[in-house]
Image: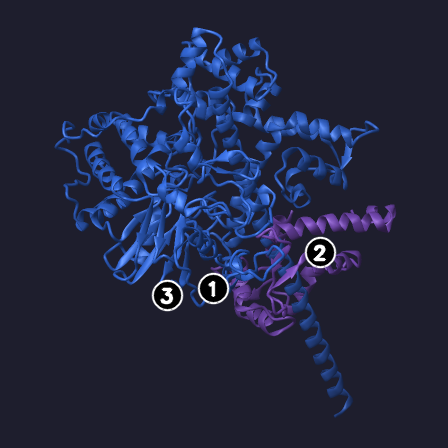
Amino acid sequence: MGSGTSTQHHFAFQNAEKAFKAAALIQRWYRRYTARLEMRRHCTWRIFQSIEYAGQQDQVKLHDFFSYLVDHFTPSSNHERDFLDRMFTEDRFPQDSEMEKFGDYESIEVPDNYTGPRLSFPLLPDHATALVEAFRLKQQLHARYVLNLLHETRKHLIQLPNINRVSTCYSEEITVCGDLHGQLDDLIFIFHKNGLPSPERAYVFNGDFVDRGKDSVEILMVLFAFMLVYPKEFHLNRGNHEDHLVNLRYGFTKEVMHKYKTHGKKILKILKDVFCWLPLATLVDEKVLILHGGVSDMTDLELLAKLDRHKIVSTMRHKTRKENGKQVKKEEANQKSSAGRPTPWFLPQSRSLPASPLRLGSLQAHRAGRSSSIPCGAPRDAKELARQVRRSVDLELDRCRQQAGFPVSWGKEEASPCTPEADSGAEEPLEPTQEEWRQVLTIFSASNYYEVGSNRGAYVKLGPALTPYIVQYQANKVTHMLTMRQRISRVEESALRALREKLFAHSSDLLGEFKKHDADKTGLITFSDWAEAVESVLHLGLPWRMLRPQLVNSPTDNTLEYKSWLEDLAKEQLNRENIQSSLLETLYRNRSNLETIFRIIDSDHSGFISLDEFRHTWKLFSSHMNINIRDDCICDLARSIDFNKDGHIDINEFLEAFRLVEQSCSEGNASDCPQTTNTNDNGCSKPGTH
Amino acid sequence: MADDKEREGPDITVAEFHKKIKDAFEVFDHEANNTVDVEEEEPTGYIRFEKFLPVMTEVLLERRYRPIPEDILLRAFEVLDPSKRGFLLKEELIKYMTEEGEPFSQEEMEEMLSAAIDPESNSVHYKDYIAMMVIDES
C-alpha cells in the first residue's frame, strides 16, 4: 500500500471511469442516430400514404366528372355528342351470346414451338401447381389457355353467392391474404412459406390482385386455377381494383395489351365480366367476415347478400347516360358517405368507426387503416405489431347479424358486447376501446409496395377457434443485402421525389400563400411560415418541419427565399421550356385523371388518340374542374406534344413530355424498379422509341 | 436556430416547440388517436400526447439531447483505443458497447456492427465510420 500502488489504482480508476464515459457517449450518439433514422422511416411512410390517399381523392374527382357528364352536360354539337357516346360505350352489359364470342378460344391455335404451360379441363391440382412453377420460371401462358381458363372461371363464379359462407370443419386452418397488386413474387413466397392450397389448407384472397405490379395476369391465372381445382377451400373476394376502369388507370390494362398483343382485347373483355362475378365477401364459420374495403357503421350484410353484384361494373362510374332513369339496383348498392353522397361500398373512403360517433377527418381515418387496400405500416417487431393488429370485424358483424336476425355468439377473446342497442344500460355514446380496435385486421400482402425496402407484406392464418396468427415477409433478395440505413435512403429518395413533384404542381398556389406571409415584401419567409403555407395548400397532413431540411436547401439559418426555391423546383421537373409553366402545373395536378380519360377514349387500346380528341377531353375536363385555360393554349400544347406531326398523340409521348415517367431504373436491375402507372412495360420509356 | 428564437422571447419558443413536438408525435401516431406506443414501464404500453407534450417541451427548453460534435465523438473512440491504432477490433467494440455505459441490446449491437465493421479486417476504423455517419445525418 505504498504511494506508488495507490497512484496506480488512482489511474486505473480514472481510466475505467473514462472508458465508461466514452462508451456512454458513443451509445448516446448512436441511439440518437437510430432514433432519427426511425423518424425518417416513419416520415417516408407518411409521405407515401398521403400521396396515395390524395391520388384516391383524385379518383373521386374523376367519378364526379363522369357523373357531371351524365347528369348536367349537354353536348352542343354532333361532334361532342359522338365524343361523349364514345366515352360511355363501355357501359353496355354484354349478352351471353357475346360472351361466348369473346370466350372463344377453340379457334386459337397454339404454335408447335410453344414451350409454356398447357392446360386441359377439367383442371387438376397438378395443372395449378405446374402453372405456379412455370410462372416462377418466367414463362407466359398462351392466350388460348388464358381465355379457356377465364371461360371456366366465369362459369364457376356465376354460381357463387355474394357472400361466400365457409366452414373450417374440413380444413384445419384458413389463410387470409390481402392485396397482391400484381406482385407475383409475393404470391409465390406465400405458397412456399405457407404451403400450396389443398383440401386441408384453405385460402381466402381479399381482392386487389391486379394493377401496379408487373405480373397481374399471372396472379389471376394462378388464383383462378386454384379456385377451380379446390372450389370448397379456395376463395376470392372482389377488390376495388377488379374493375376495368381502375385498370385503365393503374396499369393492368397496359400489362395485358403488352403481353397479349393479338388477343389482349378479347381477354380484357371477358375479364371485365369475370370481375363483376367475383363474390363480394367471405364469411368464415359465421364469425369472421373478410371484405375488401373494410367496414363502417353503414355496412349491411343483408343488403350485401341481396344485391345483384353483376350489375356493378365499375365503382368509377355508377350511372349510364341511357339508363338514367332505371338505376335502382345500383343506388341500393351504394352507401352514403358522411357527406351524403352515394359512394360505392367498396371504394376505400373514409367512414366513421364502427359503433361509434367518432368521426375522424378523412385523412386520419385513412391513416387509421379503415381500408384494407392501403398498406399498414410494417413494424419490425412482433410486440409492436400486436398493438397495430385489429381483428376482422367481430364487433361490427354482430351488429349486422342482430339486424339480420342471426344468433349472436361471443368467443373468449372478444370484449363484452357494448353496442348501443345490445347494452340497454348505456346512455352515452361509446368510444371504441383498445380491445375493440383489435377486432378489425387490415391485411396487405404486397411487400416492397412503394419501393424496394419500403415495407413487408403479411398474411394471417386462422387456426382452431379462429385465433389469428400473423406472418410477415419481404420477398426481395436485394432488401436483405442492404443495411437498414441504405434501405431507408432508397425509399426516402423515392418519396421525396414524389413529394417534390406534388409541390411543383401547386407552384402558383404556393407562391400566393408565401406572399401572404411576406407582408414587407422582403422575398423571405421563415421556415415556420413555409411549413404552414405548404400544408394549407397541399393538405397532405405531413410533418413539414421534419421534412424541411430535405426539401429546402437554405444557406441561412431560419429563412428562405421562396421565389428562387420555387424556381429550383420547376427546373427539376420541366424539360420542355416551350410549354407555359402554369398550364404544365395544371396538367401535372390532373394527370392521373387525364391519363385515365385518354385510355377510355382509346377504346381499341392502340395507345393513340387524335389531336381533336385530346382537345375535346381537355376542354370538357377543364370546364368541369373550373380550370381557366384558353383554347389557343390547348391547341399549342396539343401540337407541341405531337412529336411526329401526324395528327395523333401517343399517350406515352404525352406522359413523357412532362417527365411523368419515373426514371427509377437508373440503378440497373429492372426487377428492382418500383412499378407505377407510368412505367412503360417493365422499364423506362424514352421519347421517340415507340 | 434555437438561439434566434430565444432572443425573440420564451413564449414564441415554447409555441414553436409545441408545433414541432406535435409534428413529430403525429408521425408515430398510427391510429390517429393522439397515442403512440412506447416500450417504457408504462403498464398500458402507450403514451398520450397530453402527457408527452410538457415533458418534451422541458427537454427542448433545457436543450438536453443536443447533437454531439464530431471531435468529441472522435475523442471518445480514442479513449477506447489508447494505443492509437486508429481502429477498434470487433470484439473490443462489442465488449465496450455491451458492458459499459448504458449497454446495447443484442439487436442494437448487430445493427451497429453491420454498418461499422470492415469485413476484411474485422475492425471498425472509427474516424471513417464517424465521417460516414455524419454525412448521412445531413
Is residue A596 toward the left or the right of residue A501 in the image? left
Q: Is residue B20 above or below residue A4?
A: above
Instruction: Please state the horizontal and vertical placement of residue B30, each as a whole percent of the image.
Output: 57, 52
Under mark 2, the amino acid is Pro
The image quadrant where one finds the N terminus of chain A is bottom right
Chain of the residue on which disc 3 is drawn: A
Instruction: Please state the horizontal and vertical placement of residue A232, each as a whole percent of the image.
Output: 24, 52
Q: Chain in purple?
A: B
The Cα atoms of the two marked residues, 2 and 3, are separated by: 52 Å
In the rendered image, is residue A687 in sight?
no
Q: Can you tell which mark lies on residue A465? A: 3
The 10 Å Cα crowd at callout 2, few under 14, some 14 to 19, many 20 or more, is few
Q: Can you tell which mark lies on residue A200? A: none
Q: Which residue is mark 1?
A: A414
Comparing A133 with A372, the one in front is: A372
Q: Which residue is mark 2?
A: B67
Question: Do the residues under discs 1 and 3 have CB atoms within 8 angstroms?
Answer: no
The Cα atoms of the two marked residues, 1 and 2, are separated by: 47 Å
Nearer the observer: mark 2 or 3; the answer is: 3
Which picture quadrant has residue A306? top left
Comparing A340 with A424, the one in front is: A424
The residue positioned 52% from the left and 56% from the top of the image is: A421
The residue positioned 31% from the left and 54% from the top of the image is: A166
